[in-house]
């Protein structure tokens, strides 16, 4: 009986490869450009930054370029919901998770002090974000982060 419970429990656990599933429909280049512009319009902030820390619930970034928003040199992006009970793990399929030490192009949503990134947004590691960066150049110009601001934290 214990083996069956363990087997069923394993089958019900989320797998990292299933954490984010976006529908990939055939879109023309013009439609993809329109979708990208719309996503840029919905974002609170768009930036390039290196992850300096990630505790599973929020990632801290050292901001290198700001494409949209008023950001300081260090910002945090929520990557999960902190449960009231620390013994409970909460996972959402819509949350984007970042790897420490990696640099990302980030599309962040919500208020600046509680930004989140969605997995089906243009957010991606910088090494595979070349097309997105080229599209950004047709919308905005990058600038340095605001050095006068205090780090944005929850």
Image (cartoon, helix red, strand yellow):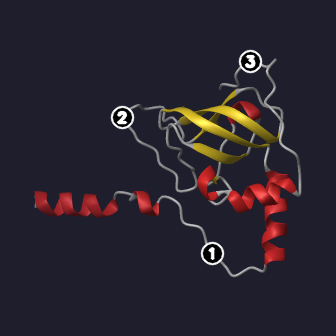
User: With respect to residue 120, does 70 lie above or below?
Assistant: above
Tell me the mark number nearer the camera, choosing from 1 and 2.
Answer: 1
* Residue annotated with mark 3: 150
Mark earlier in primary sequence (1, 3): 1
User: With respect to residue 95, does 88 lie above or below?
Assistant: above
* Residue annotated with mark 2: 87
At 75% from the left edge and 34% from the top edge, which residue is drawn? 112
Mark earlier in primary sequence (1, 2): 1
Spatial distance from mark 2 to mark 3, Cα to Cα? 32 Å
At 83% from the left edge and 32% from the top edge, which residue is drawn? 70
At 76% from the left edge and 38% from the top edge, which residue is drawn? 65
* Residue annotated with mark 1: 24
Residue 46: numbered disc? none
Looking at the picture, how far across and down is residue 69, in whole percent? 83, 38
- Classify the position of the N terminus by image quarter: bottom left
In what element is the residue under mark 1?
loop
In what element is the residue under mark 3?
loop
């Amino acid at each position: 009986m214990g083996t069956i419970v363990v087997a069923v429990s394993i089958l019900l656990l989320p797998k990292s490869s299933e954490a984010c599933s976006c529908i990939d429909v055939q879109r023309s280049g013009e439609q993809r450009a329109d979708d990208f512009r719309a996503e840029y319009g919905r974002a609170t902030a768009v930036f390039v930054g290196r992850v300096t820390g990630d505790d599973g619930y929020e990632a801290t970034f050292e901001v290198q370029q700001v494409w949209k928003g008023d950001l300081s040199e260090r910002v945090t992006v929520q990557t999960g919901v902190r449960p009231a009970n620390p013994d409970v793990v909460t996972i959402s399929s819509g949350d984007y998770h970042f790897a420490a030490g990696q640099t990302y192009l980030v599309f962040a949503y919500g208020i600046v002090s509680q930004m989140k990134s969605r997995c089906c947004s243009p957010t991606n590691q910088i090494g595979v974000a070349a097309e997105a960066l080229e599209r950004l150049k047709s919308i905005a110009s990058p600038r340095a982060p605001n050095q006068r601001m205090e780090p944005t934290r929850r």
